[in-house]
Image: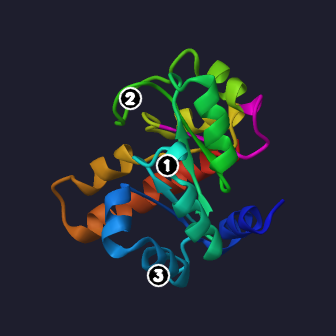
Amino acid sequence: MNSIQQTFANSRQNDRGVIMTCYNPILQFGPEAFAREASNVGIAGILASDLPPSEAEQWCAVAADHELATVFLVAPTTPPQRVTRAVECTTGFVYAVARPGVTGARDELPEDLQDSVAHIRQVTDLPIAVGFGISNPEQVAAVCQIADGAIVGSAVINIIAEDSDHETRLQQVRQFVSALAASTRQ
């Protein structure tokens, strides 16, 4: 395990997170300054969703200099050569996109999800976390049977967007995230 993977592994114990962003804010801030600030505030890694691995060499070097893990997306439609390149550039975990299309809460997991994760496992020993459409504790539990983690975004955002006061929304998010976390231990 290299130092960046160790940093990512330690982040689980230290409540450090991974930021998902587009690459443009990183460019506007300046990659070096962005990486330095992210590291200074305790971020463990960065997923720049629109940065293809084939164009990420400079960012990967800057991130490594600041002990930030790099995370890349692998979709079910990603060609095999690009999957290999993505996992070669990844130093944190592989973000396995559960389904083609846009993100958002869904009622069911895709039928081919287990096969998609198995294909990624053939080319890497890195942890694999599945996201896009994961929206409830039952889905998280199912995903954690075939992958190393589940990523839930839109379902949390939907709670935040509800028309209620700040404290109520905060309590609802806490309860929801607690239920998601508990489902990973089933």
Residue found at the far bottom of this picture: 40
User: Relative to residue 59, is residue 81 depicted above or below?
Assistant: above
Residue under the point 74% across and 32% down? 121
Image coordinates for residue 35, horizontal then vertical, percent:
50, 74
Q: Quadrant of residue 16?
A: bottom right
Residue underneath mark 1: 55
Residue underneath mark 2: 106
Q: Amino acid at mark 2?
A: Arg
Mark identifier at residue 37: 3
Residue under the point 36% across and 27% down? 101
Query: Which residues make up the magenta segment?
Result: 121-131
Task: Examine the rendering and report whether any part of residue 117 can be seen.
Answer: yes
User: Relative to residue 97, is residue 92 depicted above or below?
Assistant: below
Q: Secondary structure at mark 3?
A: helix
User: Of 108 and 43, which appears nearest the observer?
Assistant: 43
Q: Secondary structure at mark 1?
A: helix
Look at the image and say whether residue 122 sits in the magenta stretch. yes
In which quadrant will I find the N terminus? bottom right
User: Of 3 and 171, which appears nearest the observer?
Assistant: 3
